[in-house]
Amino acid sequence: MACEDIRSDHLVAFAKGLLDGDRAPSTVGNYMWHLSSVFAIARPAWGYPLDGGAMKDAMTVCKRLGYIAKSKQRGRRPTQDELDKLMAHFVERSQRRRRSAPQAQDHCHGSLLDQARERDLWSLLE
């Protein structure tokens, strides 16, 4: 299909197809948000005749129909045993594959600490 022929109903059908393919509305939303970034800059940056208005319309329709949504809040945190296994995996991988990112353990620790801090901050604000 040519760029100039893409309409909002095509984009809505694309989102519906993703949803019917067992993807969660949050995943479909993620795909659509990334695609909307392309539609926003395709004409001015590269000269592709994509209609940004069609994408905006499609996003509105997809939200109203429930095809896209924010992800659900996760309440479960990993157990200590799961964390130990995860850390052991990163250590083993960095020893086996010298080219792997050596800071993987740090990123894992950091993301868990950020989660804990965010939870604590929200409890202070409530």
Image (cartoon, grey):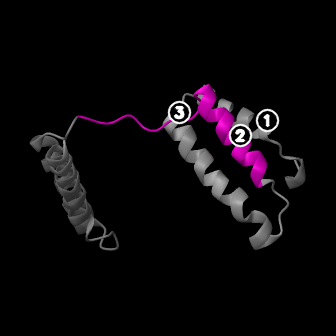
Q: Residue placed at 31% from the left, 68% from the top?
A: 97
State how far apart marks 3 and 1 are (Cα). 18 Å
Distance between mark 1 and mark 2 Cα atoms = 7 Å
Q: Residues at badges 3 and 1 in contact (C-beta under 8 Å)?
A: no
> Which of the two discs, 3 and 2, sits closer to the camera?
2
Q: Residues within 10 Å of mark 3 (few under 14, many from 20)?
A: many
Identified by mark 3, the residue type is Pro
Answer whether residue 63 is magenta in the image: yes
- Please name the residue that numbered disc 1 is placed on: 9
Query: Whole-Å distance between the Cαs marked 3 and 2?
Result: 14 Å
Q: Quadrant of residue 78?
A: top left
Is 20 on the left or on the right of 51, as rendered?
A: left
Going 16% across and 44% down the picture, which residue do you hit? 123
State the count of labels: 3
Range shown magenta? 52-75
For the residues bearing labels 1 and 2, Cβ distance under 8 angstroms: yes
The picture quadrant where one finds residue 100 is bottom left
Q: For the residue labelled by badge 2, is the local secondary structure a helix, a strand or a loop? A: helix
Which residue in the structure is indicated by mark 3?
Answer: 25
- 51 lies above or below 61: below
Question: Mark 3 or mark 2, which has the lower sequence index?
Answer: 3
| Residue topped by disc 2 | 58
Q: In which quadrant is the C terminus drawn?
A: top left
Element on which disc 1 rests? helix
Decide whether residue 72 is among the magenta residues.
yes
Amino acid at the residue labelled 1: Asp
Query: Residue 93 or 7: which is nearer the viewer?
Result: 7
* Residue 67: percent from left, percent from top: 60, 30
